[in-house]
Amino acid sequence: MRRFILPLLLFAVLVGFLAVGLRLNPRELPSPFIGKPAPLFRLSQLHAAEESFSPEDMRGRVWLLNVWASWCVSCRQEHPVLMDLARHRVVPIIGLDYKDEREPAKAWLAEQGNPYGLSVWDREGKVGIDYGVYGVPETFVIDKSGIVRMKHTGPVTPAVLSEKIIPLIKELNGA
């Protein structure tokens, strides 16, 4: 009888882990950066190659970093949502053009509209790697101290914006 207790306990623990895992949302990929400083970088701006941008430039402001690319099909899906967000001036949006060519990216924004205060050009994808980007689009909410407060993987939808991102931005801005 005793020899069955240990295997039974191990089985119960495994069932517990499985039950917890089945309740998780597979669209929410955990990020090791939540609650930690956003990785620093300095990249040239997409539209002004002679000018650069660093997250340090946003110190003291809550902002979004949206990782996108002209070749990204899902980016087209979220683009109208970002355009609407930019029109309402809720939060500054910085674009990170990921593993893209400069001219097609500029043409895509000219055609679709540009919701970004500015975009930086991450041709090799090194900054994306530093941020743990799984694929595009991905969006990060970064607070006034440069701490990553949220990561959203996949297209930003109106529901995600109204239920998660905007409330967090208001909270971080003390509103």
Image (cartoon, rainbow, N blue to C red):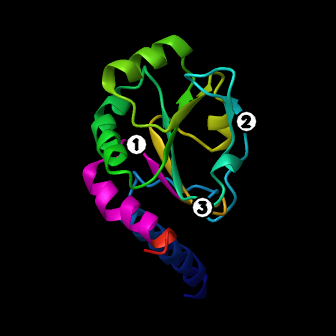
Q: Residue at x 58, y 61 (%)?
A: 143
Q: Residue at x 33, y 55 (%)?
A: 161
Which corner quadrant of the image does residue 44 belong to?
Answer: top right
Alpha carbons under labels 2 and 3: distance apart: 21 Å
Assess disc 2: are there few (<14), some (14-19) or many (≥20) residues with their C-alpha within 10 Å of its C-alpha. some
Q: Position of residue 154 (x, y in %)?
A: 40, 42
Q: Quadrant of the N terminus?
A: bottom right
Which corner quadrant of the image does residue 70 belong to?
Answer: top left
Q: Which residue is mark 1?
A: 154
Instruction: Please report contact status of discs 1 and 2: CB closer than 8 Å, yes or no.
Output: no
Q: 33 above or below 95?
A: below
Q: Which residues are magenta?
A: 150-170
Kindly state the secondary structure of the residue where label 3 is placed: loop
Q: Which residue is mark 2?
A: 42
Residue found at the very far bottom of the displayed protein: 2
Specify which label sits upstream in the sequence, 2 or 3.
Answer: 3
